[in-house]
Image (cartoon, rainbow, N blue to C red):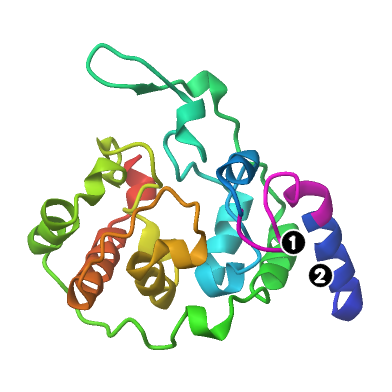
Amino acid sequence: MVAGSALADESDAILEQRCVGCHAISGSAAQSVQELWQRKGPDLFYAGSKYKSEWLEKWLVKPRRIRPAGYHYVQHIQPGKKRDMVDAKTLQPHLALSADEAEEVTESLMKLKAPAEMVSAGAFKGGSISASFGEMVFDKFNGCMACHEIEPGFGGLSGPEVYTAAKRYQEDYLVSFISNPQAWNSKTPMPNKHTAAANIQKIVQYLIALSEENWDEKK
């Protein structure tokens, strides 16, 4: 590992050469649907307020698909007999970094923060919930399984899977994003369900419970 400004220079070079083709690491959220569709991956200019650094560093070394149908799902589905199916031939794997590169890039990304008013420290109040009641809040009360898988192969395909969401996302970010997705990106397909604050806490508790199973070994 290099240190100081040399580290910054190297990580900036990796971001510029390998990341900006798909991710915005500066600027703002898409201002139109057309602009959103031109982006090939999630925005990273607030990565330090969104991701957990330990997860991010490991994932960059061994990327695993988070969105079963890709970042823009309509580009990667085809009609099936009973439902739309993912056209795997159209999906491209995420590039993998070396361990040193992943450490450097993660360190740089974690410095990219959202405005303080977007995420309140301590927004998630902790606590736990049973898997059965959590699934009821997540699916029956809010219909989230229409877009999200709660285990491999079980749930919707248009959004990211959520059985590892609590490993990759900071809990305070989850509370903020679920509360008002459009505050983060006015063009996001994630709907604002106007979920009660108490139920948002229960959803995050449920995501934590889901993440406690070792899904990587099960896949």
**Mark 1 to mark 2 CA distance (whole Å):** 7 Å
What's under tag 1, amino acid-wise? Asp
Q: Which mark is residue 1?
A: 2
Give coordinates of residue 51: x percent, y percent. 52, 67
Magenta segment range? Answer: 16-30
Q: Helix or strand or loop: what does disc 1 sit on?
A: helix
Q: Which of 30 and 147 is in front in this view?
A: 30
Q: On the rendered structure, is 168 left or right of 111? A: left
Q: Nearer the viewer, residue 74 or 133?
A: 74
Residue 106 picture quarter: bottom right
Q: On the rendered structure, is 34 left or right of 3? A: left
What's under tag 2, amino acid-wise? Met
Q: Name the residue under label 1.
A: 100
Q: Dot 1, how many residues are within 10 Å of its Cα: few (below 14), some (14-19), or many (20+)? A: some
Q: Which residue shows up at 69% across the image and 72% down it?
A: 107
Q: Do the residues labelled 1 and 2 touch (CB within 8 Å)?
A: yes
Asked if residue 72 is among those painted magenta in the image, a careful observer would answer no
| Position above or below: 162 against 33 | below
Marker count (numbered): 2
Give coordinates of residue 142: x percent, y percent. 18, 56
Give coordinates of residue 31: x percent, y percent. 61, 54
Q: Which residue shows up at 11% across the image and 52% down it?
A: 140
Q: Which residue shows up at 44% across the image and 33% down it?
A: 69
Which callout, 1 or 2, points at the residue further toward the start of the chain? 2
